Image (cartoon, grey):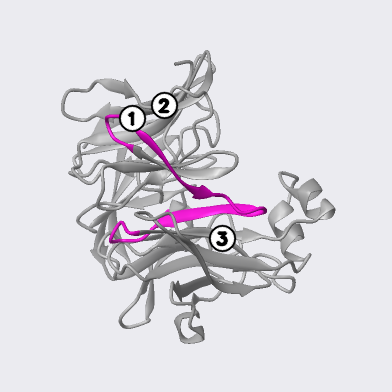
């Protein structure tokens, strides 16, 4: 491999048995999917197509969800057996996750126009795409049968879709629309598509992640960077600030026990940081390790191992991306 990286911090990377971490790596054929055995510290190559599109690991299963250009697939870990689920709809938006019971994919797709195709990847493309007011449809895919079912649509642009880690019917996303320059906050929705299942949890909130118990959503809030970091409680619907703006990081991940956060640094902070939350806005900061290089936004996506005893993060060595592990 010439480079390797784990996916977004909120995307599941570890199999249900806690033994394997799935990641993407490049080789002479292109890009494929690999698995790292946390017990033996060995690496297995799972695909050999050179077109690996890892969308995450399926909840409660030792399988990965793989997106090719035209289809959804399931990949067994560590055997590497690939099974095609169903076609990807035209205009597939890429927002994809699997439900807490490991039964369904939740995803969405936006109608496409010549203008929308030209916008993708340009600076500020998300806000520009939202202003086109195109139809966006949410759907589920049954992981056993491959059946796809549309359940809700609107004229907004959802981003950062994440299924609840404990409630099989619940997911959240950031909602953009033509009238919302920086996003309309974090919304909750249920896969039954009922209007009562769609509600704004946090107005103005953006980059977010569920707590492992599904009781809270952590998120950036403010006009930053820098941003303060907040927590929304699902049962009480109350919010509280857990970290001040001066402690902003590009991304945070919650520890398995819910007592700590790991952050991957910011423009001026060259460390992988551990924050022990003590309640009432109090915290204790620990610099877990110095980042391997000084390149901004390349050593990122820090996440806890399933046992909480170590942290994995992306980095760059001699121009090639790599994955690092640091023990607490």
Is any atom of residue 39 visible in this view?
yes
Whole-Å distance between the Cαs marked 3 and 1? 26 Å
Q: Nearer the viewer, residue 187 or 197?
A: 197
Label 2 element class: loop
Is any atom of residue 221 visible in this view?
no
Horizontal side, residue 268 vs residue 209: left or right = right
Decide whether residue 99 is among the magenta residues: yes
Image: 7 above or below 218: above
Q: Are marks 1 and 2 in contact (CB under 8 Å)?
A: yes
Label 1 element class: loop
Residue appearing at x 25%, y 34% in the figure: 20
- Residue with the mark numbered 2: 47
Instruction: Give the numbered dot on residue 311.
Output: none
Instruction: Give the numbered dot on residue 80.
Output: 1
- Give the image quarter of residue 33: top left
- Residue with the mark numbered 3: 108
> Which mark is first along the chain, 1 or 3?
1
Horizontal side, residue 235 vs residue 151: left or right = left
**Count of numbered marks:** 3
Q: 10 Å neighbourhood of mark 2: few (<14), some, or many (≥20)?
A: some
**For discs 3 and 1, the disc positioned in front in the rendered view:** 1
Whole-Å distance between the Cαs marked 1 and 2? 6 Å
Label 3 element class: strand
Image: 93 above or below 197: above
User: What is the magenta range?
Assistant: 76-103
Q: Nearer the viewer, residue 142 or 192?
A: 142
């Amino acid at each position: 491999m010439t480079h390797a990286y784990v996916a977004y911090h909120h995307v599941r990377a570890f199999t249900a048995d806690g033994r394997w971490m799935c990641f993407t790596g490049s080789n002479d054929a292109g890009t494929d999917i690999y698995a790292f055995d946390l017990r033996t510290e060995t690496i297995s190559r799972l695909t050999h197509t050179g077109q690996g599109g890892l969308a995450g690991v399926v909840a409660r299963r030792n399988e990965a969800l793989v997106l090719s250009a035209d289809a959804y697939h399931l990949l067994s870990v560590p055997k590497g057996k690939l099974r095609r689920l169903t076609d990807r709809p035209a205009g597939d938006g890429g927002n994809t996750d699997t439900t807490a019971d490991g039964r369904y994919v939740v995803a969405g797709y936006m109608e496409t126009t010549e203008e929308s195709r030209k916008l993708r990847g340009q600076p500020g493309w998300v806000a520009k795409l939202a202003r086109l007011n195109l139809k966006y449809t949410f759907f589920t895919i049954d992981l056993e049968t491959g059946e796809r079912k549309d359940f809700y649509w609107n004229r907004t642009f959802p981003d950062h879709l994440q299924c609840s880690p404990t409630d099989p019917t619940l997911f959240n996303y950031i909602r953009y629309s033509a009238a919302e320059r920086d996003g309309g906050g974090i919304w909750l929705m249920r896969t039954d598509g009922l209007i009562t299942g769609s509600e704004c949890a946090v107005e103005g909130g953006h980059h977010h992640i569920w707590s492992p118990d599904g009781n809270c959503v952590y998120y950036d809030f403010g006009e930053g960077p820098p941003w303060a970091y907040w927590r929304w409680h699902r049962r009480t619907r109350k919010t509280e600030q857990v970290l001040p703006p001066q402690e902003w990081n590009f991304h945070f991940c919650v520890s398995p026990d819910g007592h700590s956060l790991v952050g991957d640094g910011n423009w001026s902070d060259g460390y992988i940081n551990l924050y022990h939350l003590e309640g009432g806005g109090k915290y204790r900061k620990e610099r877990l390790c110095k980042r391997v290089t000084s390149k901004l936004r390349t050593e990122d996506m820090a996440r806890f191992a399933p046992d909480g005893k170590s942290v994995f993060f992306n980095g760059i060595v001699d121009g090639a991306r790599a994955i690092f592990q640091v023990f607490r």
